[in-house]
Amino acid sequence: MKKISLTGIKPTGDLHIGNYFGAIKPALELAKEYDARYFIADYHALNTMKDPKELNSTIRQVAAGWLASGLDPENVIFYRQSSVPEVFELATMLMAFTAKGLMNRAHAYKAASQINIDKGEDTDAGINMGLFSYPVLMAADIIIFDSDVVPVGKDQVQHIEMAQDIAQSINANYGKQILKIPQAAVQGNTAVVPGLDGRKMSKSYSNTIPLFAPENQLKKIIMRIVTNSQGVEEPKDPGESQIYLLYKLFADENEQAELAKLYRAGGMGWGTAKEELFRVTNRCLTPIREKYNDIMADIPALDKILEQGAEKARPIAAATVKRFRKACGID
Ligand code: ADP
Ligand code: TRP
């Protein structure tokens, strides 16, 4: 039997290059050898997105993003988390085995509470239970499909370790393997895609290169990449430059070697490097952008694909819940 790969993306805004290289592309690679279940984590997004119109539209944008990036719904079970309510039943069951202290250590919660502490506010100001218990719902997303591997960026590894902890304590309690223990699959060379300012590319830092920006906008954004004050004549270190790190994601090996040579030789200004980055980025993103625009032009067809995915997902999810209920004595 093939092993199972599962991952989800929260529909909290425009997909960016970090999402593509850190999550979507490696997941689609894995879908070639694994039975894949990929989903839109819409209830996770509800923790932060309270505008119904916006959430409704980002759900479709992220779904169209997956499809435009090459997800084949015939080959991958592709669905919205909200269309598989068994996930929420499992999450409730997992709660009973999750130490509160474990949630206190989750980094999303720790970061949010630290900001409050630094501002001299109440530790939990503005923090909802959805954010606090986020890792439990994520564990349910993963465990419900007996997932073997979870392709994610480095920042998500802690959540997967928490899912392992929770599943292990359940198996230990009942003295047998009721739930499968998942493993994270982090991509080595693209683990952290840098943003325009050199920090990790993230919506929260407003430093992203959106995956589907029209060509003229893409160019403008790339021209905004922050550089140091080295002059044109000075030799430059490609390893220190986020332009080059981004370039490596899109360029072939010859192109990479050529640009590295130009960096080291001196005589190349940052503007030239950005032009070259734009050229390879646009070359790679143009076909994906065109496909995305086509998919977004027919939302009912897109919704149908997601519904068909949920129909395939639900019996699998229900079987896990049933197995667990039986083990608990709630059957
Ligand atoms: P953001 O940080 O922009 O809010 P998300 O947290 O929604 O992004 O991330 C969705 C997926 O994309 C996750 O699997 C995450 O690990 C991955 N990801 C996000 N940003 C990056 C990045 N800069 N480099 C690599 N992977 C990333
Ligand atoms: N927490 C992930 C993120 O912020 C999204 C997510 C939700 C997820 N459930 C998941 C990822 C299950 C992998 C598996 O990006």
Image (tube, grey):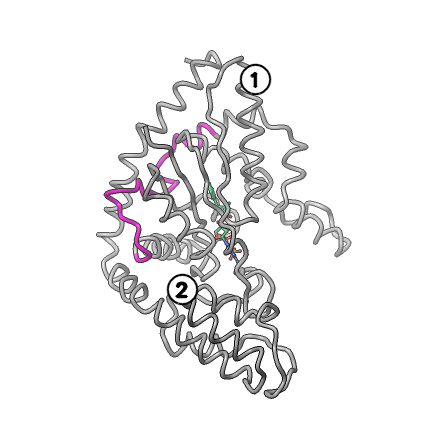
The percent coordinates of residue 80 (x first, y second) are: 36, 43
Residue at position x 57%, y 15% in the image: 173
Q: SS at mark 2?
A: loop
Q: Determine if the C-beta at disc 2 is less than 8 A from ligand 1.
A: no
Q: How far across and down, in percent of the image, does residue 320 sit?
A: 39, 24
Question: Pointer 2 and pointer 1: residues touching (CB < 8 Å)?
Answer: no
> Which percent across, then down, holds residue 285?
35, 67
Q: Compared to 141, does 206 lie above or below?
A: below
Disc ID at residue 211: 2
Q: Nearer the viewer, residue 37 or 301?
A: 37
* Above or below, comparing residue 326 to residue 74 in the picture: above
Residue range in magenta is 68-90
**Mark number displayed over residue 172:** 1
Name which residue type carries label 1: Ala
**Mark closest to the chain's N terminus, 2 or 1:** 1
Q: Residue furthest right?
A: 120
Task: Give yes or no for residue 74 being in the magenta stretch.
Answer: yes
Quarter of the image where one finds residue 242: bottom right
Residue at 24% across, 63% down: 294
Q: Position of residue 307 (x, y in %)?
A: 27, 42
